[in-house]
Image: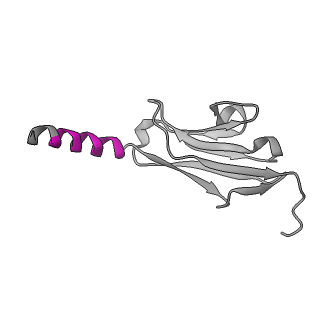
Amino acid sequence: MRGTWLLLLTSELLWTSNQAGLTVSPSRSQFFKDESVSLSCEEDNSSAGWTVRRNTTRETRAECDEWGQAANSFCSLTGTVPLDTGVYWCESREGAASSSIQLTVSGKIRLWS
């Protein structure tokens, strides 16, 4: 019994060491039309090959290069539109996923700088 618990604990530690977190810049979840957003996967293990993905009303599990400018685990989205509203997350080549973030793009014009 003791050997089984040790094996489970070791597996859990290995699994958590390959996680990534999605970082959004600027650090907020509400954006206005025509703003720019940078998304990056902060990786614990760079060999996992993390990429930014999203679900919107028109796309499911779409990779950054389909809707933004991708560079490794970094994604840049310029000229946002309301259709960019959706759920964003990082995903590895092996299929592991980070926690997700809901981003909302409003069609209203931002009045401050």
Viewer-closest of 55 and 45: 55
Q: Is residue 97 above or below residue 110?
A: above
Report whether 44 appears left or right of 73.
left
Report whether 13 appears left or right of 80.
left
Report whether 41 appears left or right of 81.
left
Q: At 80% across and 47% down in the image, what residue appears?
A: 80
Q: The N terminus is located in which quarter?
A: top left
Residue 8 among those drawn in magenta = yes
Magenta span of residues: 5-16
Q: At 47% across and 31% down in the image, what residue appears?
A: 95
What is the magenta segment's predominant secondary structure?
A: helix
Horizontal and vertical percent position of residue 45? 39, 44
Q: At 54% across and 41% down in the image, what residue appears?
A: 90
Residue 71 among those drawn in magenta = no
Snapshot colouring: one colour
Q: At 71% across and 52% down in the image, what residue appears?
A: 37
Residue furthest to the bottom: 112
Q: The C terminus is located in which quarter?
A: bottom right
Horizontal and vertical percent position of residue 9? 22, 44
Residue furthest to the left: 2
Count of numbered circles in the view: 0
Residue furthest to the front: 1
Report whether 53 appears left or right of 110.
left
Horizontal and vertical percent position of residue 19? 42, 45
Horizontal and vertical percent position of residue 54? 65, 38
